[in-house]
Amino acid sequence: MIRRAVLADIPRLQVLLGQILSVHHAVRPDIFKASGSKFSDQALKELMFNDQRPIFVYEDDKGELLGHLFLMIQEAQGSAMMPNKTLFIDDLCVDEAARGQKIGETLYQFACRKAFEWDCYNLTLNVWNANAGAVNFYERMGMTPQEMRMETIIHPHLENEQ
């Protein structure tokens, strides 16, 4: 079952956010810390009551929270952009112990339904190129690249100083 997150979900959300951070650290240790969370408990509380940035959770029939979906409604910005509304997946995670059960696919399809329901033009997200598993997953879901962000590392030695 997918439902809106509640305050009691925060400890479990933090575990899942830690798993995502661990994956990101594995592929880009120069950017991501080895442990921690993208959001503080307070930030999660605030997001839970923000209808522009809803958090949904996937709960199994035993009441165990096995995944989450952080969404963000975005409006087109700038005079050169066509007016439209986008549903942005800020975070999609399935517990590493529950992967392979189509939970990620279920959460993704839920996001597609919400985008349709909320009259969004498209559904977008960011994914790190080095995270091959996530890239393959989103391609299987039918997503295609919209734009590419490129980089040049200027100070590689700074990685060791932080």
Image: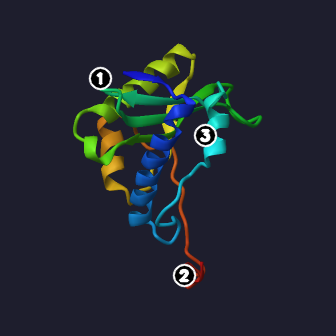
Which amino acid, mark 2?
A: Pro
Indicate left or right for 38 with 3 as reference.
Answer: right
- In-front residue for pair 62/116: 62
- Return the residue at label 3: 44
Image x and y of residue 15, in percent:
44, 48
Between label 3 and label 1, give the one nearer the viewer: 1
Of the 4 image quadrants, the one containing the N terminus is: top left
**Disc on res. 156:** 2
Residue kind at label 1, given as amino acid type: Asp
Relative image position of residue 20 (x, y in whole percent)? 43, 52
| Residue at the image point whose x is 47% and y is 34% from the top | 69
Q: Who is closer to the viewer here, 144 or 44? A: 44
Q: Residue at x 68, y 32 (%)?
A: 76
- Residue at image coords 35%, 27%: 63
Instruction: Indicate which label's residue lies in the foreground, 2 or 3.
Output: 3
Q: Is residue 16 left or right of residue 155?
A: left
- Residue 103 in the image: x percent, y percent? 31, 32
Q: At x 50% / y 72%, what residue is drawn?
A: 30
The image quarter containing residue 45 is top right
Badge 2: residue crowd in 10 Å (few <14, some 14–19, many ≥20)? few
Q: Which residue bears the numbered disc 1?
A: 61
